[in-house]
Amino acid sequence: MIQIDDFMDLIALRSSVRSYDPHPVEKSKIMLLLEAARLAPSAVNFQPWMFLIITGDEGKSAVRQCYDRDWITQAPVYIVACGDHKISWHRQADGKDHCDIDIAIAIEHICLCAAAQGIGSCCVCNFDPLKLKEYLQLSEDIEPVAIIPIGYQANEEVVRPKKRKTVEEISKWVED
């Protein structure tokens, strides 16, 4: 069993990396990231996800046309997390689609697994999804939800202290 202190240290260690070393990421480590995503829970276990691993220059260039920031060019790997709205669970009471929630959980599994392996990651959602969908030739029901740059963190970047609200600010006990 994992020690809770180790788990909390991993959570504290994980950060959004925006400076990457050019060293390639080993395929075995990328496969562990995908295995972590595969094991993520999803509503009704529908697993409405697909992960596209982009390592080639042409593919990475196309992704950069959808997210034009210099820092992302350093990452040797992009994982595009996609959701399938046709197979995702929709809550019966109001029809709420849980695809984005399921994908977010799988993405966090990827990011935590990356941190555990000494690999940097960042969840990027500020991109042009229509351009990316067209480039990837995704069907109507498949949506690119996030781009996750993956790579070894550049030496000069350090993990910044996390600025978070207190537990009291984000929680309320309902005991009645």
Image: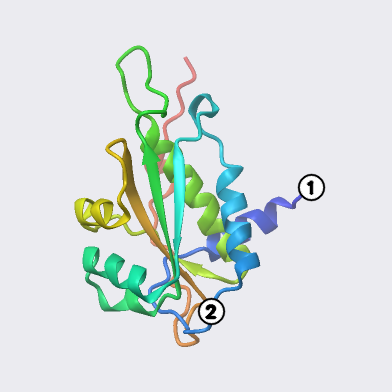
Circle 1 or circle 2, nearest the eye: 2
Q: Would you say 47 lies left or right of 124 here? A: right
- Which SS class for mark 1? loop
Task: Read off the residue under disc 2.
Answer: 24
Residue sitting at 58 percent across and 57 percent down?
33
Q: Earlier in the sequence, mark 1 or mark 2?
A: 1
The image position of residue 117, as x and y in percent, is 63, 67
The image position of residue 67, as x and y in percent, is 24, 65
Residue sitting at 49 percent across and 19 percent down?
175
Classify 29 as above or below 48: below
Residue sitting at 45 percent across and 22 percent down?
174
- Residue type highlighted by circle 1: Met
Q: Report the colour scheme.
A: rainbow
Residue furthest right in the image: 1
Classify 71 as above or below 94: below
Mark on residue 1? 1
The image position of residue 76, as x and y in percent, is 45, 75
Classify 118 as above or below 46: below
Residue sitting at 37 percent across and 13 percent down?
92
Q: CA distance from mark 1 to mark 2?
A: 32 Å
- Which SS class for mark 2? loop
- 52 or 71: nearer the viewer: 52
